[in-house]
Every structure is written in structure tokens, then in C-alpha cells.
Amino acid sequence: MSLDLVIRGGTVYDGSGKGPEVADVAVKDGKIAEVGRIAARAARELAADGLAVTPGFIDIHSHSDYTLLVDPRAVSQITQGVTLEVIGNCGFGCAPIRNIELSRGNIYGIDDRVPLEWRSIGGYLERLEKAKPAVNVMTLVPNGQLRLAAIGLSGRAANPAEQAEMRDLLQEGMGEGAHGLSIGLEYPAEQGAGEEELTDLAAAVGRAGGIFAAHTRYRGEGAEAAVAEAIRIGEKAEVRLQVSHLIPRAGLEVGRRTIAQVERAQAKGQDIAFDMHTRLYGTTMLSTLLPAWAAAEGKEALARNLASGEARAKMKQAPGIIASVGDWSRVILLDLPSMRQYSRRSLAEIAAERDQDPFDAAFDILAQEIDTLHRAMVLLMVYSEDQQREAFAHPLCMPGSDATALAPDGPLAGQVFHGAYTWASWFWRFMVREGRALAPEAAIHKLTGQPAAILGLSDRGRLAAGGRADIAVFDPREFGERATTFEPNQIARGMRHVVVNGVPTLVDATFTGERAGAVIRRRGPAMQF
């Protein structure tokens, strides 16, 4: 048998969690042909002596929906060994779209370089295929876009007609290839969604064998009740539940109690797991401070509300991600071209300098950025290393980027999303190489075989004959992040070779120019309501 590629002499971790073996990995027609001692020569051979050879990493929680269209090279991901991303998380995503102006606010990294010319999940996936991403991509249907399409930006529950419309859009999206449903109940577009409404949608996903990814309603005060709600929905709907970035912003003990909630649900037989981002802070748009009603009638109405003292007083009472932190000194404004004097400073410090309430300082920033609301981003300094270490050591937890794929050159060179260049490399450095909290084989399983199993991918996440040839080869003594909190756009160190669907994409830490990723569409039972 003629072989396309052999990776020789590496320390192979097959993704199952078992210990390593020194072996060769052979590739033919985009699949693993053999793992072992391989005498036959191949058209191309890569040396892996002293290097770890693993399945390509799976980012189970990504927000690259739009940035992969702008720059499909996925440099930040490929240079960390990532070969598959799951997008459409937290209720955010690029489809379905009915009202373009409303939908734009629910897409991370949006700009004007790629017009939103599609309307359906299927149309979006076709556009993504034309872009030829370097990584494989799976999508969820984002509930935020379902609600914006059927209800608009409203803080109320869906009425029966709107619920039926959301079901139809969900059915259409999964029929066109989506693998499940995501929710982001902290965000303005979804704060009015009730438990019954969500259970109705999640149950249809469950019957179709999909996954339900839940960014819970409260992640500060009220976190335990919010996790309980997600667990109830998953149980009633009989759907596989993935709790997104589970650990709340309310401290170590509350985090431990939320993990215990997940453990109890699993012990009762529920199909449940969780993920966590690899940062000591959360990151979100400053515009999440705005309640749904403030922008429901468009930009002009929002401008009036931001200029009104009465409206501001009402907005200050609204729950939300940023307000849940409870300490404005821990809310850091990231680099903002229009207000460089405030970049990298806390809202508490900015407000004090302006002799304002922190809410009013934030509202003034949003008023100035009203044409580019998505651009003002903040860090929420709310996590500790102890929280991260305990979460990632848990058998039900997997790491995810919670970021967009970026590149330090090209059309995305000026964009920042913390975690983009660091998530897998930070995880390896923190949990394995320096922290020694996980054995290498256990960490690799969390990056490969475990998310593949949750996603129902029997042919990925393992180095085994017949599986798809998604492969990462790296130096385990060097793999780690270069990026820092305020200099985040720096490529990780230590990744040597990356193979996507049998095609070498990174060789000797240099891009080959090949982009062999695929859009992985759902294949399964029809949706039932």
C-alpha cells in the first residue's frame, strides 16, 4: 500500500487516556492507515523524535463563526494544534438572520468585510465552505439569533406563535447541518427566555440526538440556581447537556457547589459534562451592560436612552454579566481606539477620573461607540488559579477557547480576543508541564477523545486505524503560551506539525498554505416536535 504521509518516531498519545508508546503514524486518503512500526515509505515523511504525537485538538467552545470567514487560516488555532472548532456557542452566531441590524449585535468579531448575505444556517455553512477554513467546523444553532429572528430584542417570553417560529428555525438549522442548540441566558437577547420555552426547544434537539450547550442565566450571584435550571432543562428534555464555562464569578466555594450539582445530576443518570475557558478572567462586550429594551427600537432609540437620565437610572437596575461582578475595579476596559486614554484601565478608575458613577462612565463610552458597539470589550477579573486547577482536573471538564480564531497578520491583525492564542497552550503549560495536576495522557484526552465522544464523533479524537487524520505534533517540554493579558496577539510556542484531514497544514512550525478543513454537518434522525 502506498502511503501519503508517515509521522515517524514520536511519542504517541492516542486520545483514549491510556499511556504513550513510541510509534509511527501512517496516513492514506485523509485517514489513519496504521499506528505502529511502519516499514513502508511515504510520499511525505515528518520526523517526530522526542515530540508528542496526538489527535488534533478539539475546541468544544469557540466563537469563530465570523472570523473564519474573514481569515480562514485560523492561525491562532492551528499553531496550538487545533483541528476542529465548535461554533454557535452562548446563543451567539451567524444564523439564522431575519433582521440584519439586530443580528449583528449577536455576532462576535463582526465588521463589514464579509456582508451578511445569507439568512439560514445552511446558507451560512455554504459560505463557510467557500472560505475553505484550515480547521474543521461544527456549529450549534444559537438561541440568541432564534429569539432575535422571532421576537426581536425583547425582555419577554415568546408567545405561542413566536415559539412555533423558533421551533421551525431550529428544525431548519439542524436539518441543514447544525449539531444542537446553544443558549446564552445572561445576554440581552435571551434574558426573557423562560424555562418552559427552552425545554421545548431542547427536547426536540434531544430527540434528534443533538447537544444542548448552556451558558447559564446567572454566573455571579444566583449561579447555583442558574445551574440547577440548566440541569432541569436537560433532564426534562432528555438531551445531552454541556454546561458552558461552568465555574461562576462568585468564588471558589460557589464553584465547588456548582460542580457538585453536575456530579449529582450525572450520578442520577443524566448525560452531562462541562467546559471552562483557560483564563483567569472573563471577557465580554461592554454593550452587554444594556438591557434588551434599551436597543430594541434601533440605534437612534439607543442613543436617546443613553442620553436620558431617566433611562440610565432604569438601565442601572438591569441584571447582566458586568453588573454581576459587583466590583468595578475588576472590570477592565480593553484597547479602544476612540478612547485610548481609558484603555487597560478599570471602570472604577475611569469613573473616578471623570467624577462619575461607573455605570455612567460606561454609558458614555457606549454612546461614543454607538456605531461600533461590539468593539468596546472588557475583562472581568474574577477567577483564581485554584478554581481553574480544580475545574480542569475534574473528569467531566474540558477546556475551550471561548474565543475567536485570529491571526497576527492579515485582515484580523488588529483584532483581539483573549484566549485565542493561549487556550490549549495555557492548559498544557498550567496543568501538565508546570502544574503537574494532570498526566499528559489525561490532558490529551480532555483535548481530543473526550470532546469527540460528547460530540458524537466516532472517527475523530483518536489516533486509530480508520479514523480521520487530524494530528498534532508538539514538543511537550516547550508547548505553552507567549501571549500576555495586554499583549495577547502572540503565537504559542512548541507546536511543530499539524495535519488536518490528512493534509499537512503546519510543518516545522511553518504554514504550508494548505487549508483542508471541512464543515462537518449533522447526520442523524429528523427533528421531531
Image (cartoon, helix red, strand yellow):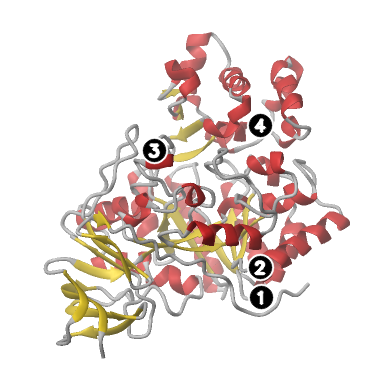
Mark nearest the camera among 3 and 1 is 3
Asked if disc 2 and disc 1 are in contact, CB closer than 8 Å, the reply is: yes
SS for dot 3: loop
Asked if disc 4 and disc 3 are in contact, CB closer than 8 Å, the reply is: no
User: What is the C-alpha distance between the residues marked 4 and 2?
Assistant: 31 Å
Residue 46 image-quadrant placement: bottom left
Residue 102 image-quadrant placement: top right
Q: Earlier in the sequence, mark 3 or mark 1?
A: 1
Name the residue that disc number 3 marks: 413
Name the residue that disc number 1 marks: 208
Residue located at (47% from left, 10% from top)? 353
SS for dot 2: helix
- Say what amino acid the circle numbered 2 marks: Met
Q: Nearer the viewer, residue 96 or 477?
A: 96
Residue located at (65% from left, 54% from top)? 95
Q: Earlier in the sequence, mark 4 or mark 3?
A: 4
Q: Nearer the viewer, residue 126 or 330?
A: 126
Which mark is drawn over residue 174? 2
